[in-house]
Image (tube, helix red, strand yellow):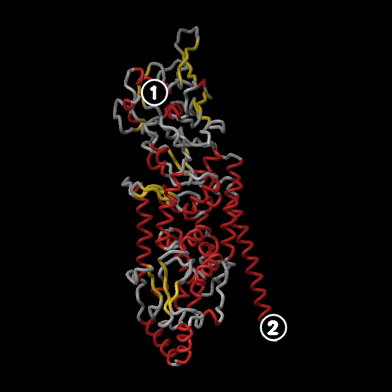
Amino acid sequence: MKHLIKSVAVLLGADPKKPTSEDYTPEAKALHAEQRADKSRIESIYIELAHKAQHKTPEKWRRRRWTVLILVNLLFVVSYQLDIQMLEGALTASRFVGFHMADLNSALQVMLAYKEVLINLMIGTITVLIMWWLLGGRTFCSWVCPYHLLAEWAEMAHDYLAKKKIVKDHPFDRRVRTVFWIVFAVLAVVTGYTVFETISPTGILSRALIYGPGIALVWVVTLLLFEIFYSKRAWCRYACPIGLTYGLVGAVSPLKVTYNLSTCFHEAECKKVCEVPHVLDVVVKGRATEADLFIGADCTHCGRCVDACPTNSLNLEFKGLGQLLR
Amino acid sequence: MAKQKKTLRGKQKARRKFLRTVVLGVGVVGAALLGYIPVVSRWHKRIRPPGALKEHPFLSSCIKCGQCVQVCPVNAIELADLDEGFGIGAPYIDTRKQACDFSCDGLQCVLACPTGALTHDINYPHETDMAIARVVNERQCLAVQGKGFKGQARGPAFKGKLRYEDIDRWNPIRVSEYPYDLELCDLCVRQCPIEIRIAQCEAGKPPSGDTNQCPPQHAIKLETIASDDGIVRKRPVILDGCVGCGVCEMICPPEPAVIVMDGTESRGMVA
């Protein structure tokens, strides 16, 4: 329960807190002490990192993820364009071989604006709720959302330009995403319109892919340029209410990235690639309160940290199923 | 001394971050709220698909997924772009380009709608209420001029489709593939889906053998105009049975069309 509260607080925008000495389990305390005593570890980190720099391993999870993301979106497109009717509709709402599916955030906005619980919509919403609860909530973001893929490319451009000292990242206060979520919920109730849908790059892109492009793509391009030149991954990190909705669902999900303190060398390679590095606060030397921990709800399960970790201390796991997913 | 400088810089940094965040917040919410303008000022007066609720509840309940677009056999339904503000992604029908001819018979768009923005309370074409046809340009009307019509109703390049039951009961074809030869132009009445259904019912052959498909009221008729020059002239008159499907507007040969759809707020299903 303590972990859940902490995880949701960080999801809502709180900074991860440094644990106090009573927070640590004896096992974690012992591991930290052992690591402090063992001076040879520092040496081995350097060897390890030098080795890694020479032998670049492919980003296994990123490949899998991009494949899934492209296939899902392609299935939407071909279902309509080739009339194979597998996955009809768009990401906001669809039918998968006849079964209703509704995006949780879009369904929420519709119900708040319309002020009526629509039975058909409920069926689709509950199906999707169960699905993303099982699959980890924000997993939707990195494995399905088409904007995420474009944002990853924008991130690459940003990192490249930042390395050349042409651009600088301007972080925002993460709590603003919670403010957005509340403001857009209130606006839906007050105006009776699905206000957020107007600027949702997820909906815009999904419809553009399926039904053809329109001027709405100008907004998506604006966001991408903003991310390249001003603030890295800004939309997904600080703005998108869809991410927060799925984050809340994923808070109690069985699918998690797990962290193993005993094997961790604290190189922080994982934090460098993470879209939401605040969830990886536990990997900082001395922060992990237990020997094995789950990464918090804001994690999108993109698996980049799993690929980046030189010592396999981070893994995608399904609680109860062990490491079948490795 | 050095330490103090550092904390000051830290404070400054935090303040800048806060201000930046406020600007971001106002910017994003402001951008979204701009979507109110096209809706309130009604930049676009759209005809919505069959079964659509009145405009405001329709836009509230529509989840902007386009499933109605996908099932329409004549591709009558399009989705709105960003210039329609809060209406982005909501379906509409450009009746002059491609009207709804009910060739699906069963209101497929209504069945496809996952939210009830297209109300599931209706089952038959004559129960819909998309708009009402209005005769706006009577002097251009071929029938009023006493003229016939020969050829393709909207020319060879027109891509709009209709279902012609004498050609294919299930597959709509292009209007350009179905040339007419009429002594007096009566295309608006001849192609009216409601009138076609009434005629089928009167002939004892209701669509799908279902008498519930029979519309209770006529939608359009040609009324003879008294004239002293010996030429037969008629004018189209819209009747209570009109559901605003737009076929008369689509098929009308003159440019601009004699009949247009009026989708004012009074139309549309009650939420």
Q: Tell me if residue B14 comes above or below residue B81 in the rendering.
A: below
Mark toward the start of the polypeptide (2 vs 1): 2
State the SS at label 2.
helix
Q: Is residue B231 visible?
A: yes
Q: Residues within 10 Å of mark 2 (few under 14, many from 20)?
A: few
Q: From the viewer's perspective, is B75 left or right of A241?
A: left
Instruction: State the CA–CA distance, disc 2 to disc 1.
Output: 86 Å
Name the disc covering residue B29, or none. Answer: none
Query: Pointer 2 and pointer 1: residues touching (CB < 8 Å)?
Result: no
- Give the percent coordinates (x, y) of residue B30: 61, 54
Q: Which chain does the residue under circle 1 lie in?
A: B
Nearest the camera: B48 or A242? A242
How many neighbours does mark 1 have within 10 angstroms: few (below 14), some (14-19), or many (20 or more)?
many
Residue A82 image offset from top left, x and y in percent? 32, 47
Residues marked 2 and 1, same chain: yes
At which x and y percent is residue A183?
A: 60, 55
Using the image, name the chain to which the residue with label 2 belongs.
B
Kindly identify the residue that appears in the image at 40 percent across and 57 percent down. Answer: A131
Identify the amino acid type marked 2: Gln
Residue B35 shown left or right of residue B122 in the figure = right
Mark yes or no: residue B85 visible: no
Judge left or right: residue B106 versus residue A251.
left
Give the residue number, with chain letter if any, for mark 2. Answer: B4
Q: Nearer the viewer, residue B176 or B58?
A: B58
Place of residue B70 in the rendered image (x, y in percent of width and height, measured from the top left): 38, 43
Amino acid at dot 1: Cys
**Could you say which is closer to the camera, residue A181 or residue A7?**
A7
Identify the image quadrant of the C terminus of chain A.
bottom left
Residue B214's tag is 1
User: Which is closer to the viewer, label 2 or label 1?
Assistant: 1
